[in-house]
Amino acid sequence: MPPSEENEAGQLFQAVFNQVSQRITQFNADENKLVFYNSVLAGGTVMAGSVVTNCQGINKLWAGGDEAKAMALAKLFTSFMLFQCLRWIEGKADNPQEQTSKYPPVLLDILSFFGETSEEEIEDLSNINIQFRYEVRQTHMTHLAILLLARACQACNHQCIDWSKVSYPVKSMQPLTQSGAIVDSAPISGVNDIRAFRASHAAGIQAMTKYYEDRSKADDRFTQNN
């Protein structure tokens, strides 16, 4: 992506962050929870911008982008950052337990900040969580990368997978290929794009943790001075 287009994409995702963050500040919750939600949003928007910039298959479909695409991608990757955080929290618990509900209740909070959502979208994102929770135990998370890239393509109005033919967790891509679930593999199967996706994931985590740590330190300083 040329620097000018990268800058324009960055501005779009910054605008999405500002808009959604404003809604978060109006949410009825304690300050710690608001900081948490904003940090997840920071990670999601940074990851979305990185995927658009560095994954060539998505970059072609982005085609200059607009607010609707930016919002859809930010919602997708902010949800993913939430799943990442929840997994960390579980891992730090004295007695970590497997998730029993179909989806994390806080997912509904996150989605509400982006506007109206459908039961189908909640189901789709819950399936990403199922895949992540399965694949985080593996060493590569390649299938998760492919599935999330396909969801990103869909956010850019391009269908790569017939989701009605997908069962979660996906343990092999072969059944999807044999069943005809793969509609267009070109934007999601490139080795370089999968590597770029992993780098984008890391960038999102870094942005999320930095926002949380910076805001927490700022709140501590405010408390000490008052």
Image (cartoon, rainbow, N blue to C red):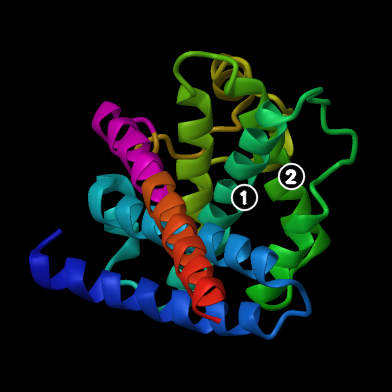
Query: The disc labelled 2 sits on which kind of residue?
Result: Ser
Q: Main secondary structure of the magenta part?
A: helix
Q: Amino acid at mark 1?
A: Leu
Q: Is residue 154 left or right of residue 121?
A: left
Q: Sort mark 2 into few (<14), some (14-19) or many (20+) by Cα contacts within 10 Å.
A: some
- 124 above or below 12? above
Label 1: element kind: helix
Q: As drawn, is 127 to the left or to the right of 187? A: right
Q: Quadrant of residue 66?
A: bottom left
The answer to which image quadrant residue 37 occupies is bottom right
Residue at horizontal 83%, vertical 26%? Answer: 97
Q: Which label sits in the foreground, 2 or 1?
A: 1
Q: Which residues are magenta?
A: 189-204
Q: For mark 2, give the secondary structure.
A: helix
> Mark 1 and mark 2 in contact (Cβ < 8 Å)?
no
Residue 115 place in picture, x, y as percent? 68, 78
Q: Nearer the viewer, residue 220 or 226?
A: 226
Q: Outermost residue, front direction?
A: 225
Work out which residue is located at the far left of the displayed protein and give it.
3
In percent of width and height, residue 210 lies at 39, 54
Q: Is 128 on the left or on the right of 189, as rendered? A: right
Q: Quadrant of the N terminus?
A: bottom left
Q: Residue 214: give x, y in percent of width and height.
A: 41, 62
Q: Is residue 169 visible in the rendered structure shown here?
A: yes
Q: Name the residue located 24 percent from the left edge and 31 percent from the top edge.
A: 192
Q: Quadrant of residue 83?
A: top right
Percent position of residue 162, x then y:
62, 41
Magenta run includes residue 106: no
Nearest the viewer among 201 and 131 is 201
Query: What residue does disc 2 label?
Result: 126
Q: Which mark is residue 82?
A: 1
* Magenta-colored stretch includes residue 191: yes
